Amino acid sequence: MFRVDRSQNRLSRLVQKRFSDLNLRERDHLQEWLANQPDALGEELLIIQKEFDGFTDTRERLDLLAIDKDGNLVVIENKLDDSGRDVTWQALKYTAYVSSLTKTQIVDIYQQYLDRHEGGGNAVERICEFMGAEELEETVLNPGNDQRMIFIAANFRREVTATVLWLLSRGIRAQCFKVVPYSFGEELFIDVQQIIPTPEAADYMIGMTSKGTDEKVTQNAQKKLQNIRAEFWTQALDQLRADGVVLFRNINPTRDHWLSAGSGVGSCPYQMVFSRDEARVELNLQRMETSENKWLFDQLYMEKDRIEAAFGDSFDWRRMDDKKASRIVYAKPFDGFDRENWPAMIDWLSTHIRKLETAMREPLARLNRSLRVSETEQHEEAS
């Protein structure tokens, strides 16, 4: 670090020092500097207590306790020339201790700080002013598990930085600030630099943490949904076997929202579908060639009245000209995630998959013969 002499247009090197060489002490000096100038840590913080010892059944004291602009409690641990090995463990304990503090307790703690160190003042008014709120009721203090940790030292041991990086990767907001004293003659300078995460990486890491959290939530939701489906299909297949439905006799439960069984036409399965808001039975026409799927659909649609009469109701005929597949569907609304509805859904599926197979059996067999004749002719022509 250099001092600029503008009159001489020259740089003068500042001499890096150790706090111990300057007879500076953690509590009397570094802690006091930060308590009176917390924005030296790169953001607006409201110091609400120092040497806080309001923990049940322990005499431990944390260095500084603050609130950030989001109402989160911030535990600040100060060391001088060396971070020591145990600072992260200490901070984790203190953070756990303060995580249960209520708004009323926080106000009381801050009021004690004002009375003892600031010559008085109104804690409620100061907190509201800091938070930009008209009334204390508008503020949220110490929400959820969003407590933070800030570590301050001239040098950090590897075990400390490794722990802080691990905490960050788990979505716990922790920061390391390197604080180094410099001298120039009788003048003393303090350089405060955030080293973990670097300021440039902080937003990125927060974003990645949020992304990771979202992904974890999504994965948990997916796993829960898959377990629900597997449980539903287990019950459904047991009931279908009891009802004598042979179509799905050799099918096992899955975690998918559908179960498929062969219709006699290649790649054109019957399907039962279980979803959040409905149950469905359908015939899926999903052969490799789009033209074959549309031909099958059109041939069946020409027999629409006879097929629906055999089924006993009207289908939803989905030719889906913009897609390769086509589909013939019959559905009924259900609240599928209410297990009390499962017996009715399963009974409905059992009844209507049998009706669907009965209505489609003869026309599909006839169309399948036509497909085979066409495939044979094409093979002979190619030979």
Image (spheres, rainbow, N blue to C red):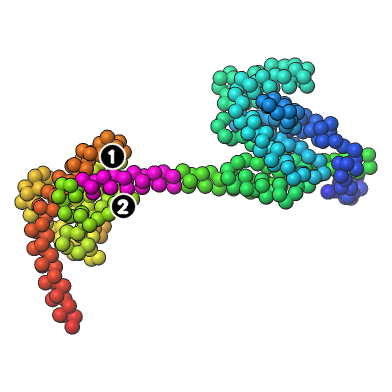
Extent of the magenta region:
219-239
Kind of element beneath mark 1 = loop
Q: Amino acid at mark 2?
A: Thr
Residue 339 magenta-drawn?
Answer: no
Mark 1 → mark 2, Cα distance in angstroms? 16 Å
x 62%, y 40%: residue: 173
Q: Dot 1: within a 10 Å radius of its alpha carbon, few (fewer than 14), some, or many (20 or more) residues?
A: some
Q: Position of residue 227 (x, y in %)?
A: 36, 46
Q: Look at mark 1 in the image and give the residue it sits on.
A: 336
Q: Residue at x 58, y 45 (%)?
A: 170
The one nearer the camera, 88 or 290, is 88
Of labels 1 and 2, the one closer to you:
2
Q: Say which element carries label 2.
A: loop
Which of the two labelled residues, at mark 1 and mark 2, occupies the earlier sequence position?
2
| Residue 227 colored in magenta in the image | yes
Check disc 1 and give the amino acid type.
Answer: Gly
Where does residue 212 sit, x and y in percent of width and height? 52, 47
Identify the residue position indicated by label 2 in the image.
254
Query: With respect to residue 95, does 9 lie above or below?
Result: below
* For residue 266, above or below residue 153: below
Q: Position of residue 51 (x, y in %)?
A: 75, 28
| Front-most of residues 186 and 285 | 285
What's the residue at 46%, 43% (across, down)? 217
Residue that lies at the very extreme toward the bottom in this rendered image: 383
Q: Which mark is residue 46?
A: none
**Image position, residue 150 (x, y; %):** 69, 39
Query: Taking the image as drawn, is residue 78 in sight?
Result: yes
Can residue 322 be seen in this snapshot? no
